[in-house]
Image (spheres, coloured by chain):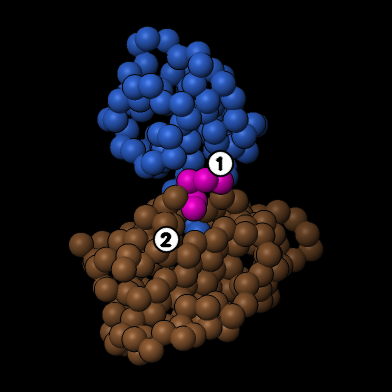
Amino acid sequence: MTRLVYFAWVRERIGKGEEEIDLPASVVSVADLLNHLKGLGEEYEMALQYHDVIRVAIDQEHVEHDEPIGGAREIGIFPPMTGG
Amino acid sequence: MTIIPTIRVQREDFDLQAEVDRLSKGKPDIGAVVTFSGLCRDEGGTLSALELEHYPGMAEAEMTRIGELAIERFGLKGLTAIHRYGKIVAGENIVLVVAAAPHRQAAFDGANFVMDFLKTSAPFWKKEHHKGGHAGDWIAAKDADDTARDRWK
C-alpha cells in the first residue's frame, strides 16, 4: 500500500486529502502513477488533466515525473507552490 | 561552529523585534541584520483574507534545506524563517525571514535568496477569500518567481 496525499486544488478536485492505494506493478515512474490515477474516475481526471503543472514529492522530497517511485511510503501530489 | 537555521511553520503571528533580538543579542560578530516580512494585501479592497495550506513535515524540511543553503552560500551568522498557515486576514503577517551576517551585502542577499527559494519550493498554497465571504480561486504560481529563483544559479 502506498499513501497518497493531495494539496490545494488537487485535493479539492479529488475530494479527499489522502488515501492508501495498491499500485499495480506496471506503475514504475511518477508519470505512470499520474496516468494510473487519471483512470480511477472523473474527479481524478479533472484534478490531474494538466499533467505538466502537477508537482510530486516522494517521501517529502520534490521529484521529476520520470523519477521511479520505488518503495515510496508517501507520495504528495499538488499544484505549483504559491507561499511566501 | 555550524550555524543552524531556525525554522517555524505556525498558525499564530510572530514578533519581528523578538526574532531579531533572538538572532543578534549578545553576538558582537554580527554587523548586519536584514528582515523581510510578507503580509496579506487586500488587492485594492477586494480581498478579505488568504487561506494558507501547507504540507506538514515537508514544509519545515524544505525551509530548513533552503536556510542551510543560504547560511553556507552567504556565510550567514544566523537565519530565521517563519511561515504561517491557516486563514490570514488582509494586513496580517504571512512570512518572516531574518538574516544576520558580519556585513550588509551577505545579509541582504541571504534574505533575498531564502525568499526566492521559499516561494518556489516550499510546499505552501494560497487561496483567496473575497470581501462578502465567498471563497475565490487558488493563487496561480508566477513565472516571474521562477525567474527570480533562477538568477541565483
In-front residue for pair A2/A50:
A2
Q: Secondary structure at mark 1?
A: loop
**Dot 1 amino acid type:** Phe
Instruction: From the viewer's side, name the closer residue of B30 and A4.
Output: B30
Residue at point 52% right, 45% down? B57
Tag 2 residue: B118
The chain that appears brown in the image is: B
Disc 1 target residue: A7
For the N terminus of chain B, the image quarter is: bottom left
Amino acid type, residue under disc 2 in the picture: Leu
- Boundaries of the magenta span: B56-60
Quadrant hosting residue B148: bottom left
In x, y percent, where is residue B147? 29, 63
Q: Main secondary structure of the magenta part?
A: helix
Q: Is residue B105 visible?
A: yes
- Which colour is chain A painted? blue
Instruction: Reply above or below: A26 against B147.
Output: above
Regarding residue B138, the answer to whether it shows in the image is: no
- Is B59 magenta? The answer is yes
Residue neighbourhood size for the residue with mark 2, other residues' Cα within 10 Å, grouped as few (<14), some (14–19), many (≥20)? many
Q: Residue at x 43, y 57 (%)?
A: B63
Q: Is residue B110 left or right of residue A11?
A: left
Residue A25, horizontal then vertical, whole percent: 37, 9
Residue B133 occupies quadrant: bottom right
Residue at x 62% of width, y 34% of height: A17
Q: Which class describes the residues within 10 Å of circle 1: few (<14), some (14-19), or many (20+)?
A: many
Residue B91 or B6: which is nearer the viewer?
B6
Chain ID at mark 1: A
Residue at 66 percent of width and 73 percent of height: B92
